[in-house]
Image (spheres, coloured by chain):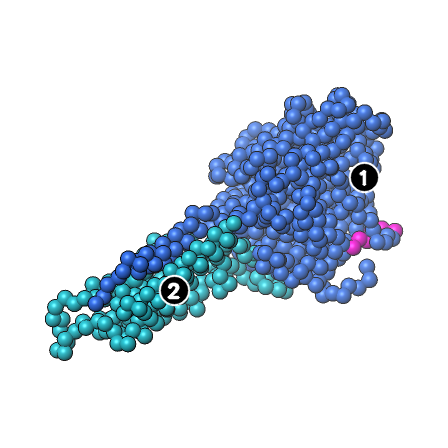
């Protein structure tokens, strides 16, 4: 006789229930990556962690023309969330990396040694690197060409000419396929180039010239970094870190400070303002000092852009606390407290009154800013859009460049030619910070209107907003060879919104990006 | 012990409704449906994972053979084997929908394969995210799961009471352990 007892039915129901419920629970429960995200209540309260500047780096030796540096890309344990240890990857183990301060006219040689582990502990990829000095007109083989990689256990000497105007540059990883992850792990730092013009200005210098490297982060409950992709559209963290400190508090004296703000976030863009609504003075953008300062009450800041902003704390009484706020541009993913960045607490301490002004004229001789639309010899159009699961430029990806054996170019031009590049984003669902290597450019127009006040200086990254068309004026006078252009939302970049352009110089043969490959350890003397 | 399914006469024709015939029919239908679904998904998985496609092919064919064989009467030992095998298959299914299985390719495996090798590189350099090897739940695979549940329950019903009791207890324990494990993971 075949029959099922009630007990049988009950037991089989358990099986059926579990078999159906477990997969459905997982499907409804959301991404596994977020399952261990640290609770907001376990994060530090904003403005409770003291501010700190990144460490400085010094040459290991110098000669008549060149300063030589050695940097080890390596894992390190650090305390970002108070009470928890976080494993990061830093240049010399520091996140952000140590700050270079170099003088225009002196060449730098930076040895980068990849001492990272053979595999990423969570994401299971081999962390090769390619170091890009962002803002430098470096030769192609030293520009961090994405496919010119340095595996763990290899090293490469990068040569930087430092021949441009004073500016705030930054160095970061650019290795193909996992730039976003490497930068998120900490591979980014500031590189400040000064020159006689900048040093002669009575603007804040020395201890009053302060790097602010802003990035958003996310953590697991155990303090480890949590990298969560939002459907390949970007990474958006719930912690805003300045120089690796979450929402820090900086004590300031009653005078002017110059802040070199670098948005080192993987994807997040910001709009800065002060909590009391008073203006800040923008004195420089990506490629150095502007012709004249601009007072703004807020400014938008895309990934990889740099703005130098002077804030005058003399207008506040001792004990006043002012907050640097972020009203997020649209299409970021926001969390509690990402509307705050850091706070300044004004003290009554005595201060050095030197270099405490912002003159009406800063740097009137930036070459690219002297160009006009009439100088343009041709116009090119570039459309940045999503195509299926990929981000493309004029329907091309970096994979197309690889497939062409690195010959495919989105544009080929001649040295010293002046061109208008029209960048178009036909989507309302996302924006793109577009970076053009090698060159400085001038923003001619944004949707037919003038550039924003804070964009009135030479730049190498432009915020290409939703449904925007931007026209850039570029003179290709920085060098020649193959150089990349790409979206600096690093997730977009890794999912292939990257191409290259070629600058020709008559019959001269350009250096190949692969002409100085990384070498296996051990190192030779530097 | 021999099977308790006296389903066919000596002439090979069905004489009359017999106890268990409904379970045999349900089991055969469950096996057939699961087998067809497994075969249907073979081509779609081929580009991403040949071993996985081969697994689906093998399981699909076996289930179709089982569907045909059930009507002929099977020894209890084979029925226990059928239940055990399907518990393993369902366990694998549940695991593939809840945890990262190392032998399952990540979701963007097809995207990975579009990339050409990087000159001089170690590995392909493409990050693999926790959860990216967890397969999404779809209508077809849920239907397959239900078919396999029907198959397992029906086959269990065909076992003699004592053996059935043991098998259903094993199944219940497996279910409880799976749920407890999931609760532990989520906590």
What label does residue A195 carry, if any? 1
Q: Which residue is mark 2?
A: B170
The answer, for residue A73, to whether it is visible in the render is yes
The residue at 34%/59% (across/down) is: A11
x and y, in percent, of residue A156 in the image: 73, 59
Report the magenta residues as a range.
A64-70
Q: Nearer the viewer, residue A72 or A137?
A: A72
On the picture, is A6 further left or further right than A88? left
Looking at this view, is A397 or B45 the one in front? B45
Q: Residue at x 82, y 62 (%)?
A: A525
User: What is the secondary structure assignment of the residue under circle 2?
Assistant: helix
Q: Is residue A204 left or right of residue A119?
A: right
Residue A17 x/y as whole percent:
36, 54
Q: Dot 1: within a 10 Å radius of its alpha carbon, few (fewer than 14), some, or many (20 or more) residues?
A: some
Q: Chain of mark 2?
A: B
Give the letter of the cyan chain: B
The main secondary structure of the magenta stretch is strand
Chain ID for label 1?
Answer: A
Q: Which chain is blue?
A: A
Q: Is residue A442 above or below residue B169?
A: above
Q: Who's the residue at 60% across and 34% down the image?
A: A337
């Amino acid at each position: 006789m075949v029959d099922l007892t009630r007990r049988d039915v009950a037991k089989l129901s358990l099986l059926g229930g579990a078999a159906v419920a477990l997969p459905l629970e997982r499907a409804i429960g959301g991404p596994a990556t977020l399952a261990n995200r640290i609770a907001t209540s376990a994060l530090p309260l904003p403005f409770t962690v003291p501010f700190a500047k990144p460490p400085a780096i010094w040459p290991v030796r110098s000669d008549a023309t060149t300063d030589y540096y050695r940097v080890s890309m390596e894992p390190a344990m650090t305390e970002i969330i108070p009470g928890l240890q976080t494993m990061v990857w830093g240049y010399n183990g520091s996140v952000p990396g140590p700050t270079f301060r170099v003088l225009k006219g002196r060449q730098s040689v930076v040895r980068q040694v990849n001492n990272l582990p053979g595999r990423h502990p969570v994401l299971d990829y081999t962390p090769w690197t390619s170091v890009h000095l962002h803002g430098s007109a470096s030769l192609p083989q030293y520009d961090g060409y994405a496919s010119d990689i340095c595996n763990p256990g290899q090293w490469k000497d990068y040569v930087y000419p430092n021949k441009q105007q004073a500016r705030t540059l930054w160095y970061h990883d650019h290795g193909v396929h996992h730039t976003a992850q490497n930068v998120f792990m900490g591979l980014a730092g500031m590189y400040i180039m000064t020159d006689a013009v900048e040093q002669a200005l009575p603007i804040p210098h020395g201890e009053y010239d302060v790097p602010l490297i802003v990035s958003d982060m996310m953590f697991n409950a155990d303090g480890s970094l949590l990298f969560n992709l939002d459907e390949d559209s970007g990474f958006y963290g719930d912690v805003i870190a300045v120089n690796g400190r979450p929402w820090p508090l900086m004590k300031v004296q009653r005078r002017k400070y110059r802040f070199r703000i670098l948005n080192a976030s993987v994807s997040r863009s910001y709009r800065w303002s002060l909590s009391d609504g008073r203006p800040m003075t923008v004195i420089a953008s990506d490629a150095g000092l502007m012709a004249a300062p601009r007072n703004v009450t807020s400014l938008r800041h895309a990934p990889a852009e740099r703005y130098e902003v002077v804030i005058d704390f003399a207008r506040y009484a001792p004990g006043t606390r002012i907050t640097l706020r972020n009203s997020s541009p649209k299409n970021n993913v926001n969390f509690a407290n990402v509307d705050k960045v850091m706070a300044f607490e004004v003290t009554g301490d005595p201060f050095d009154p030197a270099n405490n002004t912002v003159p009406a004229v800063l740097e009137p001789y930036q070459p690219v800013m002297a160009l006009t639309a009439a100088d343009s010899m041709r116009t090119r159009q570039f459309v940045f859009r999503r195509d299926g699961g990929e981000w493309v430029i004029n329907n091309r990806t970096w994979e197309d460049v690889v497939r062409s054996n690195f010959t495919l170019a989105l544009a080929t031009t001649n040295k010293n030619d002046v061109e208008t590049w029209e960048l178009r984003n036909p989507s309302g669902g996302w924006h793109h910070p577009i970076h053009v290597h090698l060159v400085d450019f001038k923003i001619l127009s944004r949707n037919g209107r003038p550039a924003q006040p804070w964009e009135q200086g030479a730049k190498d990254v432009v915020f290409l907003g939703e449904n925007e068309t931007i026209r850039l004026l570029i003179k290709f006078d920085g060098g020649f060879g193959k150089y990349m252009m790409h979206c600096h939302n690093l997730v977009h970049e890794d999912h292939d919104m990257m191409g290259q352009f070629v600058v020709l110089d008559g019959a001269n043969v350009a250096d190949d990006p692969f002409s100085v490959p990384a070498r296996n350890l051990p190192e030779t003397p530097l | 012990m021999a099977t308790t399914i006296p389903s066919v006469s000596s002439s090979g024709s069905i004489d009359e409704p017999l106890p268990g015939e409904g379970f045999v029919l349900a089991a055969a239908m469950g096996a057939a449906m699961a087998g067809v679904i497994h075969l249907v998904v073979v081509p779609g998985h081929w580009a991403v994972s040949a071993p996985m496609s081969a697994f689906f092919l093998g399981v699909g064919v076996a289930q179709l053979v089982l569907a045909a064989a059930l009507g002929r009467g099977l020894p209890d030992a084979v029925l226990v084997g059928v239940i055990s095998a399907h518990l393993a298959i369902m366990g694998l299914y549940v695991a593939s929908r809840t945890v990262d299985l190392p032998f399952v390719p990540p979701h963007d495996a097809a995207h990975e394969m579009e990339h050409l090798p990087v000159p001089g590189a170690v590995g392909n350099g493409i990050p693999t995210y926790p959860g990216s090897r967890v397969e999404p739940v779809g209508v077809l695979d849920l239907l397959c799961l239900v078919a396999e549940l029907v198959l397992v329950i029906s086959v269990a019903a065909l076992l003699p009471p004592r053996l059935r009791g043991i098998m259903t207890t094993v199944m219940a324990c497996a279910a409880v352990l799976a749920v407890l494990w999931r609760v532990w993971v989520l906590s």
